[in-house]
Image: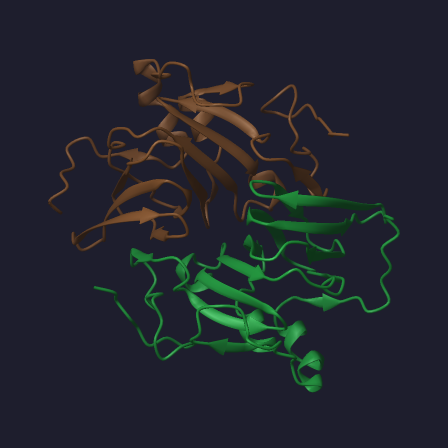
Chain colours: A brown, B green
Amino acid sequence: MTMEFATPYRSRSQIPPAPGTPYFIEKGMGDRAHLFGDLFTVYAGGEQTENTFNFFTCEGPKGDLIPAHSHPDTYEVFFITAGAVRLFVEDIEGRQYEKLLTTGDFGFVPKNCPHSYRIERHHSQIVGVAAGPGGTFERFFENLGTPTEELGLPQRPHVPAPEKFGTVPQRFDVAFLLDHQWRTR
Amino acid sequence: MTMEFATPYRSRSQIPPAPGTPYFIEKGMGDRAHLFGDLFTVYAGGEQTENTFNFFTCEGPKGDLIPAHSHPDTYEVFFITAGAVRLFVEDIEGRQYEKLLTTGDFGFVPKNCPHSYRIERHHSQIVGVAAGPGGTFERFFENLGTPTEELGLPQRPHVPAPEKFGTVPQRFDVAFLLDHQWRTR
């Protein structure tokens, strides 16, 4: 039996809305969203953890560099469970780092550090935790993108309406850095 | 080039002790500890996240049920990246749940909920996040167990000295429940 709940985010979710409830979610069955070519799946968010942390996955095809951005109040983990992801990070003194991460590799992006990534193999998966003293932002993906009941990658890229870029990122501690340049190569 | 640091926990660690520093850690190269038959590897801890979350892995052979315990102030994620792990959880009203988790499956244990698990396949790996409003407890494993430079599972089980059970768990928000019974089967 699979438990399903109505939550503030989904009419059918496997994440219990009441905090303090143990739960299990089978592979792929968290709260799903499409954003550009990628599938984001939330397994736990702020409501479950007194706003201390969240837990989500990002799956995508080999693709383009995600635009550089930073999180003023959020630390972010990239842990690769399949494929290969090139992570770019700049520290607060402007030094830039780049690393190709493959299965089992880990990357850590502190708050305020500009970063970007590029999925470099089809069927890659990133496990993410993104949280800080100000809370968690796991609902960014479905607000800039769109919630979905589908289980796989978007059949065609979901491109957000332009006006969303003016409001959604700020609400979820995301600052896009449109003129940012990576000088690592 | 791999960066190494002296930290409060290791003379050689790939986790930068100064907060706010981006870093990468290749598979298996986090701060490692042996506890009973298992290998715990910390990739990020409280110092890196203003005490909001941590990130570690647990790898083990097929083995026995871990003694039931709870965390008065810590929420815990079990995300399986290899093998199979049977997770037992009791909610605060005493209802008990049991689920066999395999690769890609997720389990969530709220604070104060008794829980236990048993690794049911050799070469299993659990990704863990364990944190709450009171902080993180990633150094529990090396304090009850022992830090190691080795890369694999313990060659023989590391059994903690008995007196450690009287002091270490309390320091890391771990309450063992020695008389606890699972009635799920």
In the figure, residue B157 lies in which quadrant?
Answer: bottom right
Q: Residue at x 25, y 67 (%)?
A: B3
In the image, residue A30 sits, relative to residue B84, either above or below, namely above
Q: Residue at x 51, y 72 (%)?
A: B33
In the image, residue A88 sits, relative to residue B149, either above or below, namely above
Looking at the image, which is closer to me, A83 or A9? Answer: A83
Q: How many marks?
A: 0
Q: Residue at x 85, y 47 (%)?
A: B93
Q: Position of residue B130 (x, y in %)?
A: 57, 56
Looking at the image, which is closer to me, A100 or A135? Answer: A100
In the image, residue A184 sits, relative to residue A37, either above or below, namely below
Q: Position of residue B149 (x, y in %)?
A: 42, 76
In the image, residue B156 sits, relative to residue B53, either above or below, namely below
Quadrant, the N terminus of chain A: top right
Horizontally, is B64 left or right of A163 in the view? Answer: right
Q: Residue at x 71, y 81 (%)?
A: B166
Looking at the image, which is closer to me, B70 or B133? Answer: B70
Looking at the image, which is closer to me, B149 or B11? Answer: B149
Quadrant, the C terminus of chain A: top left
Horizontally, is A93 left or right of A7 in the view? Answer: left
Q: Position of residue A35 (x, y in %)?
A: 39, 23
Horizontally, is A178 left or right of A50 in the view? Answer: left
Q: Position of residue A109 (x, y in %)?
A: 33, 50
